[in-house]
Amino acid sequence: MLYHPLILKLNKNPHHFHKLESADYIIKAYNPLCGDQFTIYLQMDGEVIQEAAFHGYGCAVSKASTSMLVQKLEGRKLEDFKGLMEELELVVGEADTGLLQHEDLKAFEQVRDFAGRISCVRLGWDALRDSVIGDW
């Protein structure tokens, strides 16, 4: 079952789904294969992400995943994103997810069975990594 109840919930009522005009970082996420497109906004207070938001359109999986991402970013430093990204890699990869710190990421575990949808889960995450975080 691809659509875990949490994916459906976040698709219908995503967290922080609005434009943030005063953002310090504005990150564009676009998947040319399916047309999903989001803009991620980060308002910083020093090194801490004071507010995170996103806006745009996409499938239920990409919208739910980006919603979860921005929710997890608020109140954290950008450097904390690396650990979050590593957990996402466990979920969409072949690894055991039994030791995740963020259990809600397991909602995307079934994407493993739909290889073409992995890019949907990763869309916002990869855009943030590529635009702001750079190489680790």
Image (tube, rainbow, N blue to C red):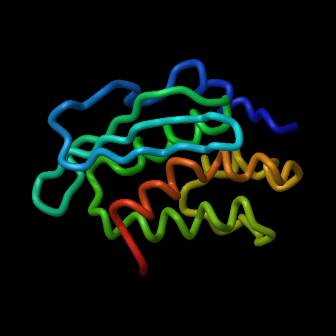
Task: Judge left or right: residue 34 versus residue 73.
Answer: right
Residue 39, how many percent across, how many down?
Answer: 40, 38
**Rendering quarter of residue 97:** bottom right
Q: Residue at x 41, y 42 (%)?
A: 71
Q: Residue furthest bottom?
A: 136
Quadrant where the N terminus is found in the figure: top right
Residue furthest top as drawn: 12
Note whether 104 is above or below 61 in the view shown: below
User: Which quadrant is home to the C terminus?
Assistant: bottom left
Q: Where in the figure is residue 104, as x and y percent of width and height?
A: 60, 47
At a point 20% along the width and 57% down the height, the residue shown is 48
Name the one closer to the observer, 66 or 28. Answer: 28
Up-down relation of residue 92 to residue 54 (above or below): below
Q: How many marks?
A: 0
Judge left or right: residue 72 versus residue 19: right
Q: Please indicate whether residue 3 sits to the left or right of residue 49 in the image.
A: right
- Is residue 15 or residue 29 the one in the foreground? 29
Q: Nearer the viewer, residue 136 or 76?
A: 136
Q: Is residue 4 left or right of residue 105?
A: right
In this rendering, the answer to whether 79 lies above or below 91 is: below
Q: Is residue 12 above or below residue 68?
A: above
Outermost residue to the left: 46
Residue at position x 47%, y 54% from top? 127
Residue 110 point in image, percent of width and height: 82, 48
Residue at (56%, 70%) from the top-left corner? Answer: 86
